[in-house]
Image (spheres, grey):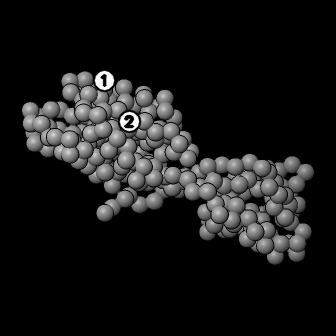
């Protein structure tokens, strides 16, 4: 069974809620690392320096194995952790979220704060374009130059329906094609090439792997 990888978001999204006169401004952004996430947090704090709180949560790593959160002065567990739980529940990684609060003078209580910090993040992510991730295996397909055009067409059609990718061909002594495909699809690729070549052309695993993203429609309730 193929390993399941957490998704991420394609671009930054923002959302704002006003709750009992306090403004809660949510910012969610894709990041490449924990250091990148910290940079985003610093940038938000700099841009909204006059706000009382800048609570944050982040999940990073291909498997979502690094997670951190900050209440930034709010009562412990009422801001950062609820925001982090939104990311974990949606199975997202390489994402940082920041909620900036402009205090309106009315205290919300612990339960109210949990909802106030998690709700704008949930709504922001509903507006985001989600990028699903999968690991592809590298495969080399080598054919004679005279057959390159035929196999180029065959492989382009094959990857289009298999969640796979085709690299640019390289012409040396023979024409070499680079295919990136889910491991579960490799038997089908072998069968396709065998049928087209009478068994003469076989894909060869290169041992390389690539984590790629595929966009899907925005999340909606």
Q: Residues within 10 Å of mark 2 (few under 14, many from 20)?
A: many
- State the SS at label 1: helix
Q: Nearer the viewer, residue 217 or 109?
A: 109
**Label at residue 169:** none
Q: Is residue 95 above or below residue 206?
A: above
Comes first in the chain, label 1 or label 2 = 1
Q: Quadrant of the N terminus?
A: bottom right
Residue 131: % across, % down: 48, 53
Residue sitting at x 48%, y 56%:
215
Residue 219: % across, % down: 37, 59
Q: Nearer the viewer, residue 156 or 188?
A: 188
Residue sitting at x 29%, y 34%:
76
Q: Nearer the viewer, residue 101 or 163?
A: 101
Is residue 45 among the parts visible in the rendering?
A: yes
Residue 24: % across, % down: 21, 39
Q: Is residue 60 above or below residue 127?
A: above
Residue of label 1:
46
- State the SS at label 2: strand
Q: Residues within 10 Å of mark 1 (few under 14, many from 20)?
A: few
Q: Quadrant of the C terminus?
A: bottom left
In the picture, measured across the screen, residue 213 lies left or right of residue 120, that is right
In the picture, measured across the screen, residue 200 lies left or right of residue 22, that is right
Residue of label 2:
69
Q: Nearer the viewer, residue 146 or 206?
A: 206
């Amino acid at each position: 069974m193929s390993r399941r990888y957490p998704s991420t978001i394609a671009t930054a999204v923002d959302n704002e809620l006003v709750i009992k006169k306090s403004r809660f401004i949510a910012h969610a952004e894709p990041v490449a690392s924990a250091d990148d996430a910290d940079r985003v947090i610093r940038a938000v704090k700099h841009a909204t320096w006059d706000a009382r709180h800048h609570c944050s949560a982040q999940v990073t790593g291909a498997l979502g194995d690094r997670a951190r959160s900050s209440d930034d002065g709010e009562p412990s567990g009422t801001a950062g952790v609820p925001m982090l739980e939104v990311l974990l529940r949606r199975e997202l990684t390489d994402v940082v979220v920041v909620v900036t609060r402009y205090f309106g003078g009315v205290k919300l209580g612990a339960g109210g704060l949990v909802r106030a910090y998690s709700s704008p993040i949930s709504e922001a992510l509903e507006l985001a374009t989600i990028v699903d991730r999968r690991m592809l295996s590298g495969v080399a397909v080598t054919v004679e130059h005279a057959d390159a055009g035929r196999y180029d067409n065959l492989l382009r059609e094959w990857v289009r329906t298999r969640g796979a990718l085709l690299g640019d061909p390289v012409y040396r002594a023979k024409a070499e094609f680079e295919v990136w495909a889910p491991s579960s699809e490799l038997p089908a690729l072998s069968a396709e090439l065998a049928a087209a070549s009478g068994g003469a052309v076989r894909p060869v695993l290169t041992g390389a792997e690539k984590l790629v993203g595929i966009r899907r429609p925005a999340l909606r309730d």
